[in-house]
Image (cartoon, grey):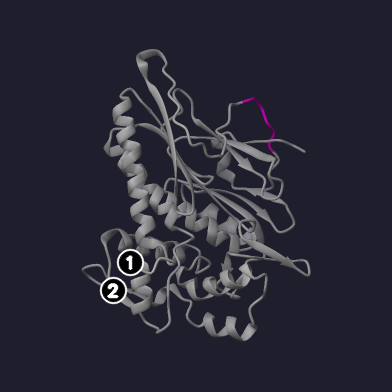
């Protein structure tokens, strides 16, 4: 349905920005709010933790950053020494348990979206990345020839973390899901340190654990075209909220926006939606679904969301119309009417 809710009351929002300082806020019972940020996975990652033990909070955040760095090292297709690059070069490899799990999750999301999310998009995504940097459109013949390599069902998983590709020239690109998977790994580490309340902000994609002291975390949704405009606010706990859009890397030519999210069905940038925000229990699922549903039209995307348990969405189509899933009302979403 169209988003038509109003701001009912004022809340203090968590700003989706990064900050390079540590903030300690001591309240009654000496609980500390510890905040740190660093550069990882091509963006700034900020972790905020509430804990009575400042030293434990520091260690937890450091370990969580370390876990994200591990995923960055194994899943970066532009680092020749990474595990994923070895697999892409050889067409087969014995993978670490983490990368094997990440590929399996990616294929499950591919199945959920009917192939709209497909990590074997790599040959096309690399082609488009090069052309977008030069503000050029690839030749149709080049697109068509690479499309034949795109099908996540041609990834074969065997025992002992062995993986191989059925077609020579196949490659995987985990850019649409690796950040979410890394955030899930970081959340697991925080829990190992007995952290109950935290927020991980990975370049505007967020996971909230527990509460912001006594209340749910309040997350503002930014308008994909008007950077100073807030669509609304979600009050959440123990949820991931991830967004994909056509506004990160793009150029325009003859009124057409060419961006980095490729539709596997056409081999060209997705055109149906300009932004998709997913709220889910799992960050990898939220990340992958946000990418995949951006490829679908709003009707297809919302039907998929309504069929999935514990998953909600805010979809903005290519006309600027906003749709929200039926279950979002339980998360206290507020919209500012312009």
Which residue is identified by label 2? 93
Residue 156, quarter of picture: bottom left
Q: Residues within 10 Å of mark 1 (few under 14, many from 20)?
A: many
Q: Secondary structure at mark 1?
A: helix
Position of 254 with respect to 232 (left or right) is right
Q: Residues within 10 Å of mark 2 (few under 14, many from 20)?
A: some
Q: Secondary structure at mark 2?
A: strand
N-term mark: 1 or 2: 1
Q: Residue at x 65, y 59 (%)?
A: 273
Marking on residue 265: none
Above or below: residue 67 compared with residue 168: above
Position of 311 with respect to 192 (left or right) is right
Q: Is residue 234 magenta?
A: no
Above or below: residue 218 compared with residue 140: above
Which residue is identified by label 1? 83
Give the x, y percent position of residue 117.
Answer: 50, 65
Q: Residue at x 50, y 68 (%)?
A: 114
Q: Residue at x 43, y 70 (%)?
A: 172
Q: Are marks 1 and 2 in contact (CB under 8 Å)?
A: yes
Position of 74 with respect to 204 (left or right) is left
Q: Which residue ends up furthest to the top in the rendered image?
A: 28
Residue 49, quarter of picture: top left
Give the x, y percent position of residue 15.
Answer: 57, 35
Principal SS element in the magenta part?
loop
Give the extent of the magenta segment. Answer: 5-10
Judge by depth and name the residue closer to the eye, 39 or 25. Answer: 39
Above or below: residue 98 compared with residue 216: below
Judge by depth and name the residue closer to the eye, 219 or 64. Answer: 64
């Amino acid at each position: 349905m169209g988003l038509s809710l109003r701001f009912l009351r004022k809340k203090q929002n968590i700003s989706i920005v990064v900050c390079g300082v540590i903030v300690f806020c001591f309240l009654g019972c000496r609980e500390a709010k510890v905040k740190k940020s660093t550069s990882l996975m091509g963006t700034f990652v900020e972790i905020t933790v509430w804990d009575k033990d400042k030293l434990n909070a520091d260690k937890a955040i450091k370990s969580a950053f370390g876990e994200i760095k591990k995923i960055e090292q194994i899943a970066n297709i532009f680092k020749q020494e990474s595990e994923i690059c070895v697999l892409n070069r050889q067409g087969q490899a014995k993978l670490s348990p983490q990368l094997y799990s990440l590929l399996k999750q990616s294929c499950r999301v591919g199945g959920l979206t009917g192939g709209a999310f497909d990590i074997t998009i790599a040959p096309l995504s690399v082609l488009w990345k090069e052309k977008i940097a030069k503000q050029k459109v690839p030749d149709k013949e080049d697109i068509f020839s690479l499309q034949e390599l795109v099908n996540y069902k041609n990834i074969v998983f065997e025992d002992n973390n062995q993986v191989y590709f059925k077609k020579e020239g196949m490659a995987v690109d985990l850019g649409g899901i690796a950040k979410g998977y890394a955030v899930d790994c970081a959340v697991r580490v925080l829990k190992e340190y007995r952290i109950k309340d935290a927020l991980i902000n990975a370049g505007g994609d967020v996971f909230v654990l527990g509460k912001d002291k006594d209340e749910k975390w309040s997350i503002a949704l930014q308008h994909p075209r008007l950077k100073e405009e807030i669509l609304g606010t979600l009050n959440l706990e123990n949820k991931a909220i991830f967004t994909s859009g056509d506004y990160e890397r793009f150029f325009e030519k003859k009124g057409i926006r060419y961006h980095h999210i490729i539709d596997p069905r056409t081999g060209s940038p997705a055109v149906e939606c300009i932004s998709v925000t997913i709220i889910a229990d799992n960050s990898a699922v939220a990340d992958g679904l946000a990418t995949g549903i951006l490829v679908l039209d709003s009707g297809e995307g919302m039907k998929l969301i309504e069929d999935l348990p514990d998953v909600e969405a805010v979809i903005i189509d290519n006309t600027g119309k906003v749709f929200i899933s039926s279950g979002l009302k339980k998360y206290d979403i507020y919209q500012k009417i312009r």
